[in-house]
Each structure stands twice: as C-alpha cells, then as structure tokens.
Image (spheres, grey):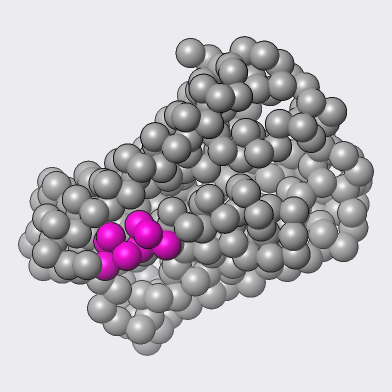
Amino acid sequence: MRDWLRLVRLPNLATAVADVLAGFLVCSQGPAALAWPPVACWLAILASVAFYAAGMILNDVYDLTLDRVERPERPLPGGAIAPRTAAAAGAALLTLAAAAACGASVVTQSPWPALVGAGLTVAVWGYDRHAKRTAVGPAVMGACRGLNWLLGMTAAGGPQAAHEWLIPVGMAVYVAGITLYARDEAGRPRAAALVGGTLLMLGGLVIAAGFVWTRTLGGPLAAGCRIGVRDWLLLWGMLTASILFRAVAGIVVPVPARVRQAVGNAIMSIITFDAVLVLAARGEQWALVVLALLGWFLFGRQLVPPT
C-alpha cells in the first residue's frame, strides 16, 4: 500500500482538494456559501483527486526508462508495482475522474464541469505522454492546475465575474513556474530554469492577488473576514516572500537537495494560498477548513515524498 501511496503522491492530493474546494467557495453565492457543500462540490473533489492520482501514475509509467537511471527507488523501476498494473490503474482513475466531472454537470444542469473535465483529461494525458519534456511542458502542467480550480468554480456556477478568472490564471502561472523550477531536480539544475521558474511563481502569485484588489476596489473583504485589504495583501506578500526565499536559496546553491526543498515548499504552500483566497471571499471559517488540509499534506509527507 505504501508503494501505491508513493505512486499517487499522497501528500499532493491534498492540494488538488484544496483547489476545488476553494474554487467552489469563491464562486458560491448567498446563504448556501456557508452551508455543507452540495453533491456537485463532492463530485468535483472526487474528479480532482482521481485526475491528480491518474496523472502521477501515468507520469511514472511513461518515465519508466528514465527513472531506472535517475530514480531507481520509485515503485515502478524498483519492481514493487508492475508497469502494466500501474497503467491500468491510471487509465481507470482517468475514466473515473471524467465520469465524476460529468456527474457534476448532471447535478448542476450545466455543461461546464464536464467540459472542464474533458479539458483536464486531455491536459493530464497530454502532459504525461507528450508535453513533459518539451518547451510547453510547464505551461501544460500549469493549465492542469488552472483547470482544477475551474472545476470547483463551475460546480458552483462560476466564474461569474471577470476578477474571478484571475485566480485560475494566476495559479496556473504559479504551478508552471514550479514545474519549470523542478525540471532538473534529479540531476544538475540549470540556472536559467531556476531563475525563470522563480519569476513565473512570483508572477502567478501577483496575478492571483489581483482577485482581491479588483474585487473590492479598496473596499471591505468578505463579511466574515476581520482584516482589511491592506492586511490581506500584507499576508499574501509574506507568504510570497517565503516561497521566494526558498527558491532563491536553490538558485544560489543549485544542488538537488535545495531544489527539492524549494519545490516541496512551493507545492505545500498551494493549500495556504487557497485558504487565504477563501479568507477574502468567504471569511475565516471556510478559510480554516481549507487550511486544515495542511494536516493531510504533512501527515502524508511522513509516509511518502511529495516529489
């Protein structure tokens, strides 16, 4: 079981749940925003987890030849799980994810969750099979994260306002930066990739923060939020600085250990950023629910590595 948990990157699944839940909460309207999430939200979460797990499994299936050289300790090159079994599991999870997204469309009577699910199916498979080692690889991976946010948003009937699009766009750019930064984490990191990835991460976080400023135009945040826009921006800036600090440390001393540390921190911080965005849109109670997913990540990290 531990080998399977390592194959699906157990800690990182928490970030997929955080994205969908946060997307749903940001786009929820009226009293329903504070109620127990409806069936559409749970179907979107199921789809997100299945998409992420499928992507991680298929990633290792298609990387088997390379992993035998660079990462022989992984479950497939190590012989703990048969490649055919892993491939079948990845295909089954991808099918389950698409079906759950279609289920969210049926429940909401909207085609958008299914369309986003179709986009995720293409993006996940396309990244693992074709795009990963090309120049567009980071962009495709970023698109997966942006579509994951949209999966939660469409399950709530959104995005309905222009400023809401800044979040999936910003998080897509942020994850594209992580992907570029992590491209050579198992070998000799290249300075250009590290610097470019850091700048992309910064740019993505700046874009996502625009959701709050353009949403409020300097006015108050959500009714349940007890801080103002300036304090929110200060909090976002502090979190951004923590990402940049680790990333720059990897640039200054470009060794695999430093790079992996920066990548792991950047992935874990997705949950925190999601929670802070929910704080602005829905107040403190739901922000704490999203933030609690850090417990899943930290516990899972004790069992298997996140990268």
Q: Residue 238 at x, y = what percent?
A: 59, 59
Residue 182 in sight in this render:
yes
13 relative position to 151: left or right:
right
- Residue 200 image offset from top left, x and y in percent: 68, 67
- Callout count: 0
Q: Residue at x 26, y 78 (%)?
A: 160
Principal SS element in the magenta part? helix
Extreme residue toward the bottom, this view: 217
Location of residue 17 in the rendering, given as x and y in whole percent from the top left corner: 37, 44
Position of 166 relative to 305 (above/below): below
Residue at x-position 64% and y-position 20%: 75
Q: Quadrant of the C terminus?
A: top right
Q: Find residue 255 and report its horizontal and vertical position in percent.
A: 89, 40
Q: Which residues are magenta?
A: 112-119
Could you tell whether 30 is left or right of 78 in the image?
A: left
Asked which quadrant contains residue 115, the reply is bottom left
116 part of magenta stretch: yes
Quarter assignment of residue 180: bottom right
Residue at the spot 35% in from the left edge and 63% down from the top edge? 116
Q: Is residue 279 above or below residue 59?
A: below
Q: Name the residue: 17% across, 67% down.
A: 110
Q: Is residue 178 visible?
A: no
